[in-house]
Amino acid sequence: MELREVIGRRRSIRFLLPHRPVEPEKIQRMLEAARIASHWGNVQSLRAVVVFRDSATPEQLAALQAPIAGFQIRLAPVVIVWYIDTAAVDEQSDRLRELLAAGALGFGEGKHDALEKQLIPVFDSIRDKLKEPGLGELDCGQGIAQATLMAYEQGLGTCCLGSPNLDKIRAALGLPDNGRVLLLQTVGYPAESWEAGGQRPRQPFEDLFHMNAYGNPFPRDPEVVSELTRDKLFTRPAPLPWREAELAYLQKALGIKGHGLL
Ligand SMILES: Cc1cc2nc3c(=O)[nH]c(=O)nc-3n(C[C@H](O)[C@H](O)[C@H](O)COP(=O)(O)O)c2cc1C
């Protein structure tokens, strides 16, 4: 599958086949994709604990349960607990030295001196600030996005879920003190059609993106839109006419009680 089609097929898939385990190698491919994502200063603060429902302890599984969208956690054969290790920032000077040695940063004879005497001291002076929510989370999001696309390329479905129990999860999984849980990502084989009701609504392109200054909408070339539609990046908009029937079927087949919102 081409990258454009993978992006187009990505949906939050809430309904997973509970009886079909996910091969660990498919999860590994997701993690490999996350690992090579870009990070500021090459800090690499994204971490994960992958919880397999078939082998985790009842305590570990119980910690993942959330009052919101709880059925999704129950159905998922795999839940990836993504977290940020803020201590990665403490080793940032070494990461910068590695970048320099790799030829990815700076040039010329003076670059070593400039790194040690100018750039590293700048980062040293704001180290604590850099551990606060901000750029680090952005990096983690890039890694999670790459893992997500890898999941869809392999025929899997996923859904990112926040949780009010992040501290409980941290304790139950034995994460280090410096770990800040970011989100849970359910992973499995989709029980719903890949379209999952169609492309979910998005705000108009022109309202989101600007050229040169705010207020000047980025021009949207219809030919590019046609090209991306041809390449399957754009798909039929939700809701497809049979979506409600599909949802009723899924609810019954998977034994989901209530309205599915909580
Ligand atoms: C970072 C992140 C956190 C999310 N948290 C939740 C959540 O806590 N509960 C939930 O039901 N959906 C959650 N979602 C899924 C979004 O609601 C979903 O992405 C949105 O409905 C758009 O659908 P789409 O992903 O299929 O385009 C989250 C998505 C992201 C990217």
Image: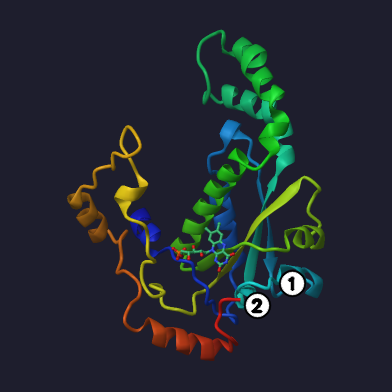
In the current view of this chain or complex, which residue is farthest to the top? Answer: 109
Nearer-N-terminus badge (2/1)? 1
Q: Residue at x 46, y 68 (%)?
A: 155
- Disc 2 crowd, CA 10 A, few/some/many (<14, 14-19, 20+): many
In the current view of this chain or complex, which residue is farthest to the left? Answer: 223
Task: Name the side, left or right, on which 24 lies relative to 213.
Answer: right
Q: Residue at x 41, y 74 (%)?
A: 196
Task: Name the side, left or right, on which 190 lies relative to 212.
Answer: right
Q: For the residues marked 2 and 1, what is the alpha-carbon distance in whole angstroms?
A: 9 Å
Label placed on residue 74? 2
Q: Quadrant of the N terminus?
A: bottom left
Q: Position of residue 120 (x, y in %)?
A: 66, 20
Amino acid found under the numbered disc labelled 1: Leu
Residue identifier under label 1: 61
Q: Position of residue 166 (x, y in %)?
A: 72, 59
Q: Quadrant of the C terminus?
A: bottom right
Q: Residue at x 46, y 88 (%)?
A: 248
Q: Are marks 2 and 1 in contact (CB under 8 Å)?
A: no
